[in-house]
Image (cartoon, helix red, strand yellow):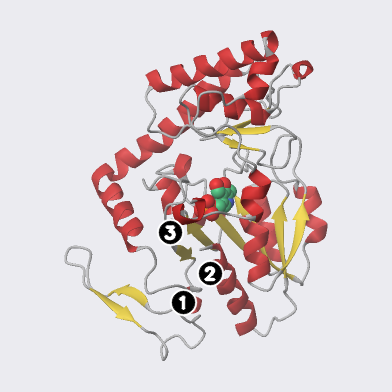
């Protein structure tokens, strides 16, 4: 989705003969997929700094904006779970320089039914259906990143597309290969129409929840994240102390004297039967521990997670070696991550 969105942006600038625009600005809090997609789309990456409150520094962004900038990519709420409240001003200065504003839809969940990226000034976006719309994130399963664009940019979308050509009451769709109608359209991006099952599941989820249900999902995700944050903030370092949206980031344990790291905490969680949260991302802090409970966890599960996290903090103070040696209860103890990445064994046959 990100790659497609950036290719749409490139096609837009090229259609206007504006070929100098070869750079994309990405905040230092961005997920690695943003610079990666920009590079694959043939664009150079320029980083913009965040303020201590986690939001993009508008004063640092302003001087970077010139006629070589194709787009600014943003995630809102951003990767530290904070709503980019300066988004109207950012949208204004980005558009004034002739660039487009890209929305990384990875964090759309808390905004469901509350705010729309188009109203914030975004021109192009993708939605990670495998985050907001029911397919679980992670586990190596398929994802899907459908792309949306503001009116006027449709002509650059890839082909073939599904086009609606009759009313909402009795909709009819056809496949548009678009070569004549949309001479600027990108060609086919991936196999046929993407991961159909993920799209179908998203549609079923949207239809079954309805607009009230979706709004409740976003609100609950936000409530759950703030509940966990407030319940643990005395024991874990909270570098950005604000009301968060669906996720927040601790910078490891508050007490650093024990030498227990975020990796140790994550491994100890496995012993207690919890899937560890994202660790060492975002890169803004050394010991990032990103907690994103989502709307689906019950209060009982959240309370259990909080109790375990508190136990681990207590254990880190009283018996740090146990936490450092975790996991102790899992079938496999500590795999060598680096060797696994460099030399992956991906079939049982290879394991012998
Ligand atoms: C802000 C942001 N952008 C992009 C991604 C990448 O998404 P995916 O896991 O679908 O590759 C993530 C992943 O969590 C993310 O948090």
Asked whether 132 or 337 is in front, the reply is 337
Residue identified by numbered label 2 = 4
In primary-sequence order, the first of circles 3 and 1 is: 3
- Give residue 144's mark: 3
List the single residue furthest toward the right. 63
Q: Indicate yes or no: mark 1 CB to ligand 1 under 8 Å.
A: no
Residue identified by numbered label 1 = 158
In primary-sequence order, the first of circles 2 and 3 is: 2
List the single residue furthest toward the top. 318
Image: 213 above or below 169: above
In screen coordinates, is 35 left or right of 75? right
In primary-sequence order, the first of circles 2 and 1 is: 2
Q: Residues within 10 Å of mark 3 (few under 14, many from 20)?
A: many
Residue at 68% across / 67% down in the picture?
39
Where residue 305 appears, x then y in whole percent?
48, 21
In three-dimensional space, the C-alpha distance between marks 2 and 1, rounded to whole angstroms, equals 8 Å
In screen coordinates, is 169 left or right of 73? left
């Amino acid at each position: 989705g990100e790659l497609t969105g950036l290719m749409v942006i490139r096609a837009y600038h090229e259609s206007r003969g504006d070929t100098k625009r070869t750079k994309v600005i990405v905040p230092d809090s961005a997920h690695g997929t943003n610079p990666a997609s920009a590079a694959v789309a043939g664009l150079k990456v320029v980083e913009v700094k965040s303020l201590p409150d986690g939001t993009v520094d508008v004063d640092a962004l302003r001087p970077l904006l010139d006629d070589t900038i194709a787009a600014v990519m943003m995630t809102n709420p951003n990767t530290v779970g904070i709503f980019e409240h300066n988004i109207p001003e950012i949208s204004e200065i980005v558009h004034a320089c002739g660039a487009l504003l890209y929305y990384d839809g990875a964090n759309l969940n808390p905004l469901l039914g509350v705010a729309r990226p188009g109203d914030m000034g975004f021109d192009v976006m993708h939605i990670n259906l495998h985050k907001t719309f029911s397919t679980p994130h992670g586990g190596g399963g398929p994802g899907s990143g459908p792309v949306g664009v503001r009116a006027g940019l449709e002509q650059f979308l890839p082909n073939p597309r599904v086009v609606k050509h009759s009313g909402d009451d009795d909709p009819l769709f056809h496949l548009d290969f678009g070569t004549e109608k949309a001479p600027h359209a990108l060609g086919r991006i991936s196999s046929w129409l993407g991961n159909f099952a993920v799209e179908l599941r998203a549609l079923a989820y949207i239809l079954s929840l309805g607009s009230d249900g979706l709004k409740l999902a976003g609100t609950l995700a936000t409530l759950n994240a703030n509940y966990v944050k407030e319940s643990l903030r005395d024991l874990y370092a909270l570098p950005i102390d604000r009301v968060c949206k669906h996720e927040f980031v601790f910078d490891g344990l508050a007490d650093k004297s024990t030498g227990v790291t975020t990796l140790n905490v994550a491994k100890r969680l496995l012993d207690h039967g919890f899937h560890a949260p994202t660790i060492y991302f975002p890169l803004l802090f050394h010991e990032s521990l990103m907690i994103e409970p989502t709307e689906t966890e019950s209060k009982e599960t959240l309370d259990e997670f909080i109790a375990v996290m508190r136990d681990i903090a207590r254990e880190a103070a009283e018996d740090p070696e146990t936490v450092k040696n975790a996991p102790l209860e899992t079938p496999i103890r500590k795999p060598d991550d680096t060797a696994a990445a460099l030399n992956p064994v991906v079939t049982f046959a290879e394991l012998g």
